[in-house]
């Protein structure tokens, strides 16, 4: 919210001595009276809603490494992958107990980042919609049915990209790359380890985002991978940045979590990407 009144409220709040109650990493948006600007989503990304289901859709996001510079330990084994400039697709395999006639084979549904965060499911048969086009082109609905059985929702996250999706086209028609996976309902979901994710995607024949590095973490390793050209199709344009996530597992084989910040995953964004002109950020 960037209205003059909101700015005045925010400035007044910032001068309030109550700010001292906040610690590093706390969200102060409400305190300052500001909200994130969300651009109008093009019609081909909005799609037709199939219904609402907060139990199986997810509110997916994570922070910039600059906000939590101590998220990873020096020398911790991490995976660094390219962050593709597209639009996020969620593909959800519901357990038998949550099957619905509206779903593909009563088990599989799709949604976007923005709509999924609000619990809205998209119609996978909506042909003009880029998400429906992507799952059809790559056979992702049927591939999800081949996932190992689970008694909770299994959610695959990936990027839909190509000409017309965002301002960076990657010299590609509509395409898809997977980058993350979790098991469970919204706030109780556990994210699969990187090793497990890579194995499952390989077994199902689902393409992944480019892997740039797997090894000990350090700032010296992260910085040179953040900038540069994309690894997609030799497109020659800039890289949006990278995603870095831990390769460590907990006792159950899931991704280990930070005691304060939660998931050990963060993005590092290229300066060239941030400074580009006429950029789009549709979700």
Image: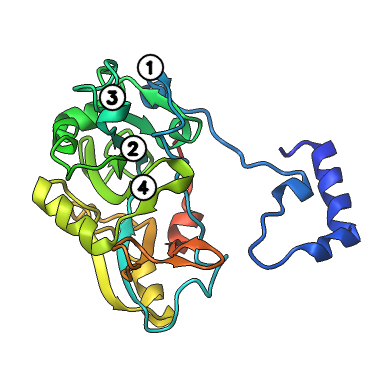
In this view, the residue in front, 99 or 102, is: 99
Location of residue 224 (image quadrant): bottom left
Q: Which colour scheme is used?
A: rainbow
Q: How crowded is mark 2: few (under 14 residues within 10 Å), some or many (20 or more)?
A: many
Assess whether mark 2 and mark 1 are in contact (beta carbons under 8 angstroms): no
Residue where numbered disc 3 is placed = 99
Q: x, y percentage for residue 22? A: 75, 63
Residue 48's label in the rendered image is 1
Mark 2 or mark 4, which has the lower sequence index? 4
Say which quadrant the C terminus sits in: top left
Residue where numbered disc 2 is placed = 90
Location of residue 42 (image quadrant): top left
Q: Is mark 2 on a helix, strand or loop?
A: strand
Q: Is residue 279 at all visible to an observer of this figure? A: no
Assess whether mark 4 and mark 2 are in contact (beta carbons under 8 angstroms): no
Residue where numbered disc 4 is placed = 85
Q: Is mark 4 on a helix, strand or loop?
A: loop
Compute the Cα span from label 3 to label 2. 17 Å
Mark 1 or mark 3, which has the lower sequence index? 1
* Front disc: 3 or 2: 3
In this view, the residue in front, 5 or 257, is: 257
Q: Is residue 180 at all visible to an observer of this figure? A: yes
In this view, the residue in front, 10 or 247, is: 247
Compute the Cα span from label 4 to label 1. 23 Å
């Amino acid at each position: 919210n960037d209205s003059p009144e909101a700015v005045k409220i925010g400035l007044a709040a910032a001068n309030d001595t109550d700010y001292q109650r906040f610690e590093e990493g706390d969200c102060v948006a409400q305190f300052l009276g500001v909200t994130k600007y969300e651009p109008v989503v093009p019609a081909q990304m909005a799609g037709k809603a199939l219904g609402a289901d907060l139990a199986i859709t997810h509110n997916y996001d994570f922070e910039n490494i600059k906000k939590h510079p101590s998220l990873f330990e020096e020398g911790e084994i991490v995976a660094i992958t390219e962050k593709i400039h597209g639009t996020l697709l969620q593909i959800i395999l519901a357990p038998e107990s949550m099957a619905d006639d509206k779903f593909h084979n009563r088990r599989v549904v799709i949604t976007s980042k923005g709509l999924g965060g609000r619990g809205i499911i998209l119609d996978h048969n909506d042909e003009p919609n880029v998400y429906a086009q992507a799952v059809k082109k790559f056979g992702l609905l049927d591939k999800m049915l081949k996932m190992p059985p689970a008694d909770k929702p299994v959610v695959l996250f990936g990027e839909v990209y190509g000409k017309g999706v965002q301002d960076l086209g990657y010299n590609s028609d509509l395409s898809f790359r997977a980058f993350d996976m979790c098991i469970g309902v919204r706030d109780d979901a556990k994210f699969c380890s990187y090793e497990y994710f890579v194995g499952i995607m390989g077994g199902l024949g689902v393409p992944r985002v480019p892997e740039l590095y797997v090894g000990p973490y350090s700032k010296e390793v992260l910085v040179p991978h953040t900038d540069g050209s994309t690894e997609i199709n030799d497109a020659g344009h800039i890289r949006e940045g990278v995603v870095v996530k831990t390769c460590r597992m907990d006792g159950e084989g899931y991704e280990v979590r930070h005691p304060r910040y939660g998931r050990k995953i963060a993005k590092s964004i290229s300066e060239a990407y941030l400074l580009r002109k006429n950029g789009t950020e549709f979700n």
